[in-house]
Amino acid sequence: MTEQHGVLQAGSPEEQVQPDARLKIQDLTFRDGHQSLFATRGRTEDLIPIAEEMDRVGFFAMEVWGGATFDVMHRFLAEDPWERIRTLKKHIRKTPFSMLLRGQNLVGYRNYADDLAEAFVQRCCENGIDVFRVFDALNDYRNFQTVVKVIKDQGKHFQGSICYSLTEPRMGGEVYTLEYYLEKAGELEAMGADSICIKDMAGLIAPYDAYTLVRALKDTVSPPIHLHSHFTSGMADMSLLKAVEAGVDIVDVCLAPWAYRTSHPGLEPLVASLQGTNRDTGFDLKQLSRCSEHFIKISPKYRHLLDDRMSIIDTNVLLHQTPGGMLSNLVNQLREMDALDKLEQVFQELPRVRRELGQVPLVTPTSQIVGIQTVNNVLFDTPEERYTMVTAQVKDLCYGLYGRTPVPIDPAVREKALKGYPRGEEPISCRPADVLEPEMEKAKQEVGDLARDIDDVLVYALYPTTGKRFLRWKYGLEAVPEACRPKSLEEAEKDQELVEKARKGLVQEIREEPAPEKGAGLRTFNVFVDEEYFKVEVEPAGGEPAVTSIRPGAQAAPQKPQEATKPAAQQPQPETPPVGETAAPAAEGSPVEAPMPGMIIRFEVREGDEVSEGDPLLILEAMKMENTIDAPVSGQVKALHFKDGDSVKKGDVLLVIG
Ligand code: CO
């Protein structure tokens, strides 16, 4: 045992602790903690007051950025994501900053061109990121090449990740065997990884698998091993401890107030558990308690985002292997379709769709791609025909745009998906970014003067629609909506009271209104609590079903109907036509209805166009996935009832073919 310093020797006196045996800790409270619990809504102003105390703890690194922060900050918080790194850096001078980077997907949902990837990572380095945890949803490391080169050239820490996935309850089976993980780790070592992360995004790793895997990795590769797991299933505490016994070098945790549930194991119990052993972290529990106190104090601001109605753990994750975020998406999508009763069917179909699509790990973005395709299959397929509505992202996956799947995609599904695919019907086998055109120059031209520096251009290049809107907020060209404004503790506590009243069934009426502004990403409900009237804004399909703001209606309360409470989804369609709809009712011809709620990305046809049956009419985005709506009959396009960017409900008449 003596040569295995990292292996836990319980009860060893502290004076025997070898410096290299100390367990290193990365704190995730500033990023994955609130991403997992509060839909990434943590604000910089709530992190600053505790930043200096956190810097004193002695973390290996603090994860402060990446993942969903970039998207959520500019979209919902009206905060400049780049500014957060620079601001925190002023307060945290010792502890390295780490970020989660989705390989060639950067902090978005598709593979970006090399020039954009290079510029983005370069700016991450210059703004203050020190450790880059890089992952790819398919574990296809060709998607690492471009970003890793920049990270290494800049002298930063490249942490290569292996997405931990399973096809059955334990490690083994068809794809995800011990050999698979060792092979992937070998690839990362060969790429120059400074450390290797087992990224267990769904909290699936069982304690004894963690032990086996870490021991095998320690015996096989030389970079330090880092374990990232989520508490979701309730096993992560035990898995971390077994990994520590096996010699893991670094583990991920959160301060207790933002730990557990779908977040991570808590820091304090782990520190206490290892005190006096050869893997003692050396942390001061009093210091941790000071830090946690701050989070206890500010957490009421975020409480309305926490789904605390269910058990602290979700055993279903182990039964159907559906990660938490994906599950809430599926439930949301089915609810919007009035098809919640189909959830069991979705669980049954999911493993089959996943297998047909190459047995991919389920992590952003593949979890959404597989999940929404499964919903489409359950809702729209017939006994004679499967994959009747294939999303654009599944087509891209079949074409090879995300990379190589762990097992080949089912040839019949691939052929069906690629029929008429614009890039070609033969899939590619090269590195995906090799077929992508450069993007930076185009982005610079499109965004024009609105972008004042390269960081602005990158916001636009990654998120054109919401990025542009954010830049208008940033430079005062457009008012920041109320929903994006930070809330005081007092306001938050008042709101929480209202949410609780609403949950207790004191809501007397709920009526859905069209979103207050297109693309704002919020649905507004009028809620009557007793005789008081409130506006409640709820995340749209695709986000978490969380109340983001609840306040007394600014204008006069609408007429309060006499009817009893009805869930929003069962409300009849509003009588008034949605914005953008032409006045003419659908008279002659075949109406084409929205098969699902979503946002119209673009119409492919104009009024007066002749179309043949099967021609694409428009692209409808639902749950971040794009669906092509084809012409059900041949004829002339009589009337478009909406315009690009409009949100539609299931059953809305999109256009008429006469
Ligand atoms: Co995570």
Image (cartoon, grey):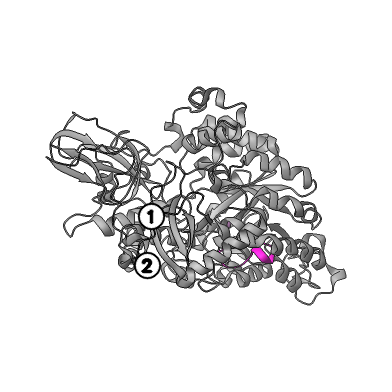
> Can I make out residue 227 in this image?
no
Quadrant where the N terminus sits is: bottom right
Secondary element type, mark 1: strand
Image quadrant holding the C terminus, namely top left
User: Would you place residue 214 above or below residue 396 in this image?
Assistant: below
- At 69% from the left and 35% from the top, the residue drawn is 126
- Whole-percent x, y for residue 513 in the image: 39, 51
Q: Quadrant of residue 559?
A: bottom left
Residue most extreme to the right: 15
Span highlighted in magenta in the image: 253-262
Query: Residue 536 appears at what percent x and percent y?
Result: 48, 56
- Front position in the image: 407 or 28: 28
Kind of residue sitting beneath label 1: Glu
Identify residue type, mark 2: Thr
Image check: 180 left or right of 562? right
How many numbered badges does the structure rendering display?
A: 2
169, above or below 54, in the image: below
Q: Is residue 285 visible?
A: yes
x and y, in percent, of residue 60 in the image: 74, 54
Q: Which mark is residue 565?
A: 2
Crowd rating for badge 1 (residues with CA inside 10 Å; few <14, some 14–19, many 20+): some
Residue under pointer 1: 512
Measured in 3D between alpha carbons, the distance from the residue under mark 2 to the one under mark 1, in whole angstroms, is: 12 Å
First in sequence, mark 2 or 1: give its number: 1
Per the rendering, the mark at residue 223 is none
Which residue is pictured at 53% across the width and 55% down the height?
Answer: 552
Observer-nearest residue: 533 or 277?
Answer: 533
Name the foreground residue: 423 vs 375: 375
Q: Is residue 608 magenta?
A: no
